[in-house]
Image (cartoon, rainbow, N blue to C red):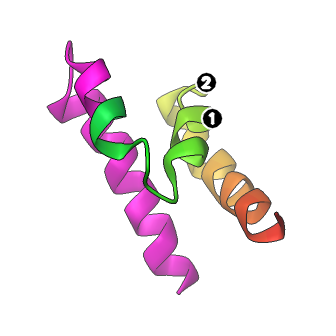
């Protein structure tokens, strides 16, 4: 389950930067009710090379809340 959740989080982050480039508000409208929305928004504060270390920690916060 943890791997599936992490994979989904990376997918949403990928979409934000690659499929919704210059249309970020549409991404927010589409996913604002998604369970992982707040985690993905927090992850946007980190650079691409940092996300591999940060995403598991962010998902752990979700699990603990």
Q: Quadrant location of residue 14? A: top left
Q: Which residue is drawn at 67% across and 46% down?
A: 54
Q: Which residue is drawn at 54% across and 26% down?
A: 47
**On the rendered structure, is 6 left or right of 42?**
left
**On the rendered structure, is 27 left or right of 20?**
right
Q: On the image, numbered disc 1 is attached to which residue?
A: 42
Q: Residue at x 50, y 78 (%)?
A: 3
Badges 2 and 1: C-beta atoms under 8 Å apart?
A: yes
Percent position of residue 1, x then y: 53, 87
Q: In the rendered view of the protein, which quadrant contains the C terminus? A: bottom right
Does residue 52 lie above or below 41 as drawn?
Answer: below
Give the residues drawn in magenta, as a range: 1-27
Farthest top residue in view: 22
Q: What's the magenta bit mostly, secondary-structure-wise? A: helix
SS at mark 1 in the image:
helix
- What mark, if any, has residue 45 been given in the picture? 2
Q: Separation of disc 2 and disc 1 at Cα?
A: 6 Å
- What mark, if any, has residue 33 been given in the picture? none
């Amino acid at each position: 389950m943890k791997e599936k959740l992490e994979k989904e989080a990376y997918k949403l982050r990928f979409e934000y930067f690659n499929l919704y480039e210059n249309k970020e508000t549409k991404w927010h409208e589409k996913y604002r009710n998604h369970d992982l929305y707040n985690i993905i928004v927090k992850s946007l504060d980190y650079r691409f090379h940092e996300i591999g270390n940060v995403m598991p920690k962010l998902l752990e916060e979700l699990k603990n809340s």
